[in-house]
Image (cartoon, rainbow, N blue to C red):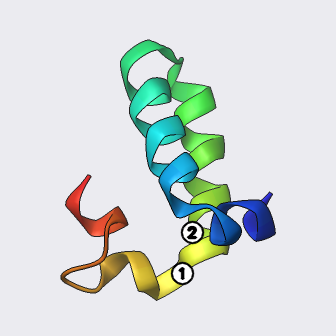
């Protein structure tokens, strides 16, 4: 999953928005773990698309 997110970060951002809106806390926790694996510290840098969510 991490490789897929890295290949298509727009999809990752859209999925995160959807899970935050409609998902359960468990689904969100799992997705955040997967995104951390995919982007690691990249999503913590200012200017990153993921840091703006």
Percent across and percent down for residue 16 are 47, 40
- Looking at the rendered structure, the secondary structure element under dot 1 is helix
Nearest the viewer among 10 and 50 is 10
Residue 2, image x and y in percent? 74, 66
- For the N terminus, the quadrant is bottom right
- Secondary element at tag 2: helix
Q: CA distance from mark 2 to mark 1?
A: 5 Å
> Which label sits on residue 36?
2
Mark 2 Cα within 10 Å, few/some/many (few <14, many 20+)?
some
Disc count in the image? 2
Q: Residue furthest top?
A: 22
Classify residue 20 by image quadrant.
Answer: top left
Q: Residue at x 45, y 86 (%)?
A: 41
User: Is residue 20 shown left or right of residue 31?
Assistant: left
Which labelled disc corresponds to residue 53?
Answer: none
Please report the residue visible at 66 percent of the width from the left and 43 percent of the height from the top.
30
Q: Report crowding for label 1: few under 14, some 14 to 19, many 20 or more residues within 10 A (C-alpha).
A: few
Give residue 5's position: percent from left, percent from top: 66, 61
In the displayed structure, 11 sits above or below 25; it is below
Residue at screen point 49% across, 27% down: 19
In the image, taking residue 48 as reference, residue 47 lies left or right, namely left
Q: Is residue 37 above or below residue 25?
A: below
Rendered location of residue 34, percent (x, y): 67, 58
For residue 40, the mark is 1
Give the residue displayed 76% in from the left and 61% down from the top.
Answer: 4
Is the residue under label 1 in contact with that under label 2 (CB below 8 Å)?
yes
């Amino acid at each position: 999953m991490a490789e897929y997110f890295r290949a298509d970060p727009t999809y990752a951002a859209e999925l995160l928005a959807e899970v935050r809106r409609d998902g359960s806390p468990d689904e969100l926790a799992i997705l955040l773990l997967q995104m951390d694996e995919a982007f690691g510290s990249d999503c913590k840098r200012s200017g990153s698309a993921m840091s703006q969510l």
